[in-house]
Image (cartoon, rainbow, N blue to C red):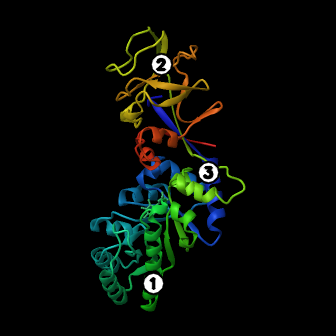
Amino acid sequence: MFQTSYIELSQSALEENYKFLKSVVGEQTLISTVIKGNAYGHGIVDLVPMAIKAGQTHFSVFSADEARLCREVAPNAEIMIMGMLDNEELEWAITNNIQFYIFEVNRLEEALKIAKKLNQLAQIHLELETGMNRTGLRKKEVLKVIELLNQNENYILKGICTHFAGAESIGNYVRIQEQIKSFKKQRKQLAKEGLIAECYHTASSAATLSYPKTQMDMVRIGILNYGFWPSTETFIHYVKDKSDRTDPLRRILSWKSKVMSTKTVETGEFIGYGTTYMARENMKIATVPVGYSHGYSRSLSNQGRVLVNGERVSVVGIVNMNMMVLDITDIPDTKKGDEVVLIGNQGDYSISVSSFSELSDQLNYELLTRLPHNIPRKVIK
Ligand SMILES: *Cc1c(COP(=O)(O)O)cnc(C)c1O
């Protein structure tokens, strides 16, 4: 193994998550798999073929580079850019059947010009401002968009959409309600102007579960696909009225390495850099070739837990750039080459990203997306 660790992706876990999602949204609503942030760290080029195998046909990305990667492995899928697309890349997007958001007039003007020149159709989604105040067309811009669309023909109005400002927290309840109202109103106004989209979509994972009426024609699902809840609150909201309160989601990703070497340390000696850990007894330790440069946070120093030979063991001392040290005093037969599970299951135990991210103060989203692109991914059953 040239790499110091690897990531396993479970096809059956992904399929179960889709099954759950379909039971939530029903047959009429399309699920778009959000694969921004390198598919939440899982890896676009590995995850997308898995999703296609599971029957998925629609993918949402943030930017043109992600769309290009996705197109390479998914020649027939629908791909939608929700964020960054340079005007210079519009021609590429239009010729490669890539759909994209319109949240400013300039992008639309350019897209229509290029589509006309190519004699093709720009596949657009109008993103309306409803209160998130990030991207989204404000009223005045919407008027200009209506004018442009009425004067041009080289487009398909694929979608009309918006995004909610934090549906995973009840603290944002009133703001979300206002957004829903605003979207409905604008949708009606646009319809009066003759602008009717193929697909209306507003919901991410949290909104899909906590505000079911936001599901409409399509939901843009990120974190749930990967087996994580947007927040504990969303999970509680979901299970509170259920008789069966087991988590219906399954984690797709496991992260594994192996013991690089073992040695002994005597009572009173410090382990690793500095003096954060002193051996209180004669100890046996193991080094693992994964450190903060590989995405194992330095804040897990003296905090992290990993699995070795079916036991949970502690990270001792500071997490280094390329390695960490484990206390294997209780499992002294551990030897070089033994599997180390950083995230995932071994024997009766499991290390979840969420326990991990509570310890290191990172959200699931952040920890996952920081997993380096160059860790090899293996798809398993
Ligand atoms: C990230 C994102 C999503 C998906 O969010 P999840 O919480 O992971 O489901 C949906 N829509 C937009 C516009 C996004 O940026």
The type of residue carrying mark 1 is Lys
First of labels 1, 2 by sequence position: 1
| Residue 143 vs residue 242, the one in the foreground | 242
Labelled pair 1, 2 in contact (Cβ < 8 Å): no
Seen at 51% across and 79% down, the residue is: 198
* Vertical placement of residue 266 versus 164, above or below: above
Name the mark on residue 248: none
Mark 1 is surrounded, within 10 Å at the Cα level, by few (under 14), some (14 to 19) or many (20 or more) other residues, namely few
Look at the picture and state if 89 lies above or below 321: below
Q: Is residue 142 left or right of residue 221?
A: left
Q: Amino acid at mark 2?
A: Ala
Mark closest to the chain's N terminus, 1 or 3 = 1
Residue at x 45%, y 45% (from the top left corner)? 368
Percent across and percent down for residue 306 are: 52, 29
Task: Specify the quadrant of the image occupied by residue 55.
Answer: bottom right
- 143 with respect to 29 (left or right): left
Label 3 crowd bin: few (<14), some (14–19), many (20+), radius 10 Å: many
Q: Amino acid at mark 3?
A: Leu
